[in-house]
Image (cartoon, rainbow, N blue to C red):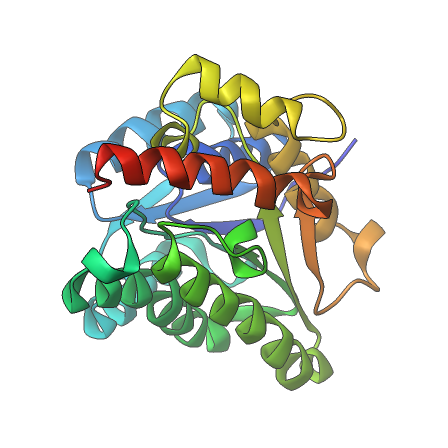
Amino acid sequence: MFDFHGKNILVVGGTSGINLGIARAFARAGARVAVASRSQDKIDAALKLLGEDNPNATPLGASFDVRDNEAVLAGIAGLHQGLGSIDVLVSGAAGNFPAPAAGMSANGFKSVMDIDLLGSFQVLKACYPLLSRPGVVLQISAPQAYVPMPMQAHVCAAKAGVDMLTRTLAMEWSPEGIRINSIVPGPIEGTEGFDRLAPADALKARVAQSVPLGRNGQVSDIANCALFLASDFASYINGVVLPVDGGWSLGGASMAMTELGQLMAKQGGR
């Protein structure tokens, strides 16, 4: 349905979970894809999969920490040399761990803020001069941006900032032809983040019951949304924070995450 032949896609954080699923979807749609993350081993594994998804395009990879601005600039510049202009940037680096605010260290809070919010800004700013005009930026956010969740004060603060960054840059950059939107995944099966928040099958089932559609999401649900938002079909969608969650954020998210937060608190968090 979507044709991205001739397009260059960069997925930061694109070596696992939702972000890898997005990268693979673009590769299957014909794009040349580059991925970046901290782990070279994960990059190598992702590149193998991307090469299988699109044998006609050699994927690229770069290892850097989004918290290190000099490393971001060097890594993005290196990818640009091999990739050319970036038609679609997916910014998806994220960090998380469940912990009560009163028991969280300043360094723990700062680490998530630095990965999610500062890291997003540094990636977007580094890519800005390399983006095609027209170009597309997709940020991968989280429901914690607007649904308060126990044991998640750091993530709630960081992702709220990510979504406001999306809105602000949509105002600043769209006159140049750069559209920017946030995708907010709901509970997505088979991802590290969901496994951390709902580690037992019974908890995953409880979350599914709180989703109006009656199921947890799949990585393909988010990947398909990314393809749509990056396509010409979405050419008038800009500055949007879009939940892709089966209606979970309408009320079930708060209820389910409160229950999970209470359970984690009894277990001591970490």
Question: Measuring 72% from the left and 38% from the top, which residue is drawn there?
Answer: 3
How many numbered marks appear? Answer: 0
| Place of residue 163 in the rendered image (x, y in percent of width and height, measured from the top left) | 56, 67
Vertical arrangement, residue 228 with respect to residue 83, above or below: above
- Camera-side residue of 84 and 86: 86
Percent position of residue 162, x then y: 49, 67
**In which quarter of the view is residue 224 placed?**
top right
Can you give x and y, in whole percent of width and height, for residue 192 in the image?
36, 32
Residue 227 point in image, percent of width and height:
68, 42
For residue 32, say whether it is visible: yes
Q: Is 257 drawn above or below residue 53 in the view shown?
A: below
Q: Nearer the viewer, residue 135 or 93?
A: 93
State the residue in front, 222 or 10.
Answer: 222
**Residue situated furthest top in the rendering:** 201
Q: Nearer the viewer, residue 216 or 72?
A: 216
Q: Determine if residue 218 is in view.
A: no
Q: Quadrant of the N terminus?
A: top right
Q: Which residue does the image show at 28% across and 53% down from the upper left?
A: 100
Quarter of the figure with the C terminus: top left
Asked where in the image residue 260 lies, by quadrant, the reply is top left
- Residue at 74% over, 44% down: 228
Q: Is residue 246 left or right of residue 43?
A: right
